[in-house]
Image (spheres, rainbow, N blue to C red):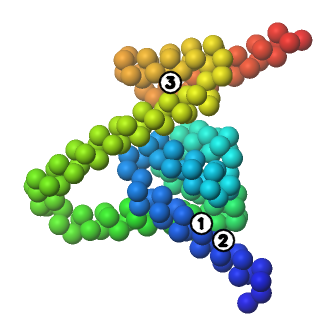
Amino acid sequence: MSNEETMRISVLRELYVTFFKIGSVSFGGGYAMLPLLEKELSEKKAWVSEEELLDYYAIGQSTPGIIAINVATFTGYKTAGIPGAVAATLGMITPSLIIIILIASFLDRFDEYPLVQKALKGVNIAVAVLLISSVWKFAQKTVKNIWGLLICLGAFAAVGFAGISPIIAVLISASLGGAAFFLKGRERK
């Protein structure tokens, strides 16, 4: 085996193991895991920049599938092409697959255990905190001016209080963001 092949296998193994670890401790979905992904992928491994990670989140939000898996796939692809995308994606889904198989094996009695009920309540609280933290960090990095703040608050109010579909809010926000970009371009000319 050549040195290049050994290095490629090493990178694929590192992608799988890294995303396996992330998938093992990521409760609450994609947004809740943003701080962990930033630390592992941007700070420790330097596989992606924070800006790229936010872009992957935005793309992952607007494409079919689970955000965390989409981010793993994008990161793996950027790092090692298609084999990297496969390794990162498999690493991310393996822990969930193992846990789901274990739960399914005694699902009919799973939620009857008081310890399980208490543990899930504790996990829910931790997930809520992670989500709030992620939203705050995400907003700090993406809301850069008054128009961004107005779009953010408008979308939050529309989805959170008016019950408007998040899809509609995303489409309207994207349209407003595009319009603001073009208006700024005209102001500069």
Q: Position of residue 110 (x, y in %)?
A: 16, 59
Q: Position of residue 33 (x, y in %)?
A: 47, 47
> Quadrant location of the C terminus?
top right
Q: Is residue 5 left or right of residue 169?
A: right
Q: Earlier in the sequence, mark 3 or mark 2?
A: 2
Q: Which residue is mark 1?
A: 15
Q: Position of residue 72 (x, y in %)?
A: 56, 56
Residue at the image position 73 percent from the left and 90 percent from the top: 1
Mark 1–mark 2 Cα distance, whole angstroms, equals: 6 Å
Q: Secondary structure at mark 2?
A: helix
Is 3 in front, or is 66?
Answer: 3
Q: Is residue 148 left or right of residue 28?
A: right
- The reply to whether callout 1 and callout 2 are in contact (CB within 8 Å) is yes
Q: Amino acid at mark 2?
A: Val
Residue at the image position 24 percent from the left and 65 percent from the top: 104
Q: Is residue 7 left or right of residue 134?
A: right
Mark 3–mark 2 Cα distance, whole angstroms, equals: 39 Å
Residue at the image position 37 percent from the left and 50 percent from the top: 27
Between label 3 and label 2, give the one nearer the viewer: 2
Q: Which residue is mark 3?
A: 169
* Residue furthest out toward the right: 189
Q: Residues within 10 Å of mark 1 (few under 14, many from 20)?
A: many
Specify whether residue 74 is in view. no
Specify whether residue 16 is in view. yes
Q: Which residue is mark 2?
A: 11
